[in-house]
Image (cartoon, grey):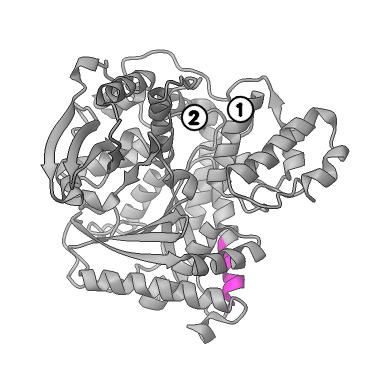
Amino acid sequence: MPLEARVQDVPVIYVDIVSAMASFLKEKAGMVDVDIDRSVRENGGDSLAATLLAAHLRSGFQVDCSAAKLLGEQSLVQVSRNLEQGVGGTIAPTAKSDAYPLSDQQTGVAFDQIRTPLGKQYNLPLYVETGPQFEIRRFSRCIIAVLKRHAGLHMRLVLRDGNLQQQIAAFDETELDIVDRGVTDDLQEELVRFCQPFDLEHGPLYRFAKVSCAGKHYLLFDMHHIVTDGYSKKLLFAQIDALYSGRYPALPDLTYTDYCCWVQAPKLEAERASSLAYWKAKIFPLPQPLALPVDRAWPPVRLVDAGCVSAFVGAEDVARLSEVAQHGGATLYEALIASYGIAVSCITGNRDFILGSPVLGRTLAGTENVIGMFASTACYRLDIDMRDSFSRHLAKVADEVRATTQQSFFPLNEMVEMAAQERPDRMSRHPIFDLMLAFHARQLVEVQLDSRPVIWEPAATRCAIFDLHMHIFERPTGLDIRLIFNSSLFSGQTASDWLSAYMEVISALSRVPGNSMESVL
């Protein structure tokens, strides 16, 4: 029921919070006809919407509600009744130390980067066009201010008692250098050259430059994934933009090292064990490896050289798929996962396999405005029955995604170790999954600096984290899809055929979602 018809039934103490939640979901998350008797997810929200809403509640009402709780079964009214006011964050600030533990997310990145020290698969290269009135010195001062605000950006890997940990290096603003790369005739190739390996031991783990191309001027950015993620990138540029505009955003109450220490605390051992048990039951025994259409033999040890192919799903197809999802109480993200699973199954013949997908990982209250590597990898185990209709298949995938979202921890590193013991012969392949699908919602994609879009270009690394890594960017006019493929295994033509098959599946299944999939494809 819409808010206007129910607000008189809600106790006065909750009216402002319920109204704020409904308004926020409409204005910031792009939802329509928000029903306060339904949950965030039932209103069409995903983990990003829930994380943004949690941050809004914390800053506007000083109440704590994790994204995981907002994505639960409770309606907006029920959530408002159960919020705790004035209690502060659930994460306690940690004492200053010489070194701090790595988060689970950082640990996985660190070990993979150490295995390929010259690899650039965890670089995050970005660029933005600057206008004629852009002041580079003013911008430099803003960068310095942001780097001072977020000490976690200065982390270095250190070895303490045989364990990898992170040390927060002192920041010397005189060392900040925005390199002038002169003039180039190809901006994309210049971004590739600018993107170079980082040294996790000595740092820094960020770099900046400026360059001119075709009479226009650009800023180039590169950061290592171990200190940031997609959501943090948005926070980072929002703060730079605010400072450049003369505004002074509030500092977060917590730091990333507070989070790292908190999640390793003994008091959370029971919750971590519960999540570990959930993932073990889901992943093991491992399904058969995917019969991928490789063009070249698997090397003895996995290589990371990569190419990229792209496609675009127009507004009409996106609207049709979104309508199917909404009719079934699912999200666009869940529909993209479901349709990709069908495409993979049609190509490989596998009916039981695991698909990796990044999730925000900000399940604890207080982490909504902290810059750091929170993004985790969820493993969705897909059980394909081509006799199902797409609507039925989508419902099963949505249940799988929601069960996963409720987990507070994503111990992928432990799962990888177990899987490697079960399949020691898979040194050239990820022991759990070969495929990753990353959905970048508009709220994450639309990052700006001085009213100009900041563009992340994953293909500029020329390196692959996974053998087939699908990036789907939500644009105003449709879905911009980039498939990063391991070029030691696949040719560009095979990668293009793979992507084309996915496009065909989206188009076909969204037109007749009630028919059996085997009769459609």
Determine the residue positioned at 22% across, 49% down: 461
The residue positioned farthest toward the top in the image shown: 96
Q: Disc 1 and disc 2: Cα gap in Å?
A: 10 Å
Q: Determine whether 30 is above or below 319 in the image.
A: above
Mark 2 lies on a secondary structure that is loop
The residue positioned farthest toward the bottom in the image shown: 519
* Image position of 71 (left or right of 224): right
Mark 2 is on which residue type?
A: Asn
Q: Which of marks 1 and 2 is nearer the N terminus?
A: 1
* Image position of 58 (left or right of 256): right
**Viewer-nearest residue: 451 or 272:** 451
Q: Mark 1 points at which residue?
A: 58
**Viewer-nearest residue: 414 or 386:** 386
Identify the magenta region: 388-397
Image position, residue 20 (x, y; %)? 69, 35
* Image position of 142 (left or right of 351): left
